[in-house]
Amino acid sequence: MNAELVSELKAPLQRAATRARIISTLGPATALAGIGWALVQPYRITLLHPRGQDFWWLFVEPPLLVIAVGLFFHFVVVPGLLEDLEEEHAAAK
Amino acid sequence: MQPPSEHVHWLFATGFLLLGLCLLGEAIVGTEVWRRRAWRAYLWPGLAFALGVLMWPVMTFYTNSAIHMIAHGAWAQMLMIAGAAELGLVRGKLQSQWWRLAVTAGFLVSGSALLVHEQNAWFFQRSSFLHHLMGWTMVVAAIFPLARAIKPRSQVAATGFALTFVVAAVMLYCDRDVAPVFGHISELAGTPHR
């Protein structure tokens, strides 16, 4: 096979792999940011010192919300997206 | 049972962060792949519309002054118009890409609303600082939806648009009702929260 043709075929493959890798890191990176925030400012997690707190202070915990968003994106949005990315790439081949 | 206003900011921040991640995902994989599943196609415009709807209770229950009410009301209307225009585009009911300018208007109105309803100076206390910062961020970032309307396939415009929501989420998470900013707080601001 022509070497030029092989490299032309490889380029979209690599692009798709890079996209898949970036997409897969978004959720864990967000969750890690939330964990880092919780470690730096543990007082923002009111659940750690719940005595005397009202409902809203116990329900809305910003670092935990960031972690939850990261996990939701990774486990709910990303799997389907990777499947579709793969299908698109297969169709293009 | 009414949440303190800082909690409302943090809940909106969570919505913005999810929206930012989804838009970033769309920018990375491309619109064609992103729209392969209907729920994903409708996610961004649906969330924008929902944020507009949720802004009405904010207008109703957090009426500190007339200017607060007008700013929140204008904001609610513009978010709903922008969300509806994008929904129309995704559904195919609207054909012209110029409808995307509704989001540009949404950004400009959101930025102006943030700036207008903050009546204290930048360094009065933290929420004042963040309102000014967010307001100017939204006004300047209006360039991204404008670029999306002119060049719908622009990667820079799509990424910038997505990152605007992530940055707005970070700023909203930093918000506190009364707290120092860079170690400074006005004597008139009141007792700082944790």
Image (cartoon, helix red, strand yellow):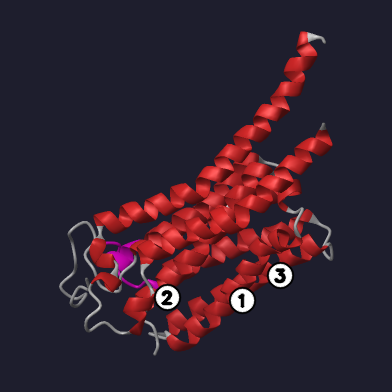
| Residue in view at x 41 percent, y 57 percent | B170
Task: Give the extent of the magenta segment.
Answer: B116-130
**Marked residue chain, label 3:** B
Image: A80 above or below B89? above
For disc 2, the neighbor class at 10 Å (few under 14, some 14 to 19, many from 20) is some
For disc 1, the neighbor class at 10 Å (few under 14, some 14 to 19, many from 20) is some
| Residue in view at x 33 percent, y 77 percent | A58
Q: Is residue B68 left or right of residue B45?
A: left
Q: Which residue position holds label 1? A: B77
Whole-angstrom CA distance, mark 3 to mark 2, is: 23 Å
Q: Which residue position holds label 2? A: B8
| Residue in view at x 39 percent, y 59 percent | B171
**Marked residue chain, label 2:** B
Q: Which type of secondary structure does the marked residue at label 2 adopt?
A: helix
Residue farthest to the top?
A2
Whole-angstrom CA distance, mark 1 to mark 2, is: 19 Å
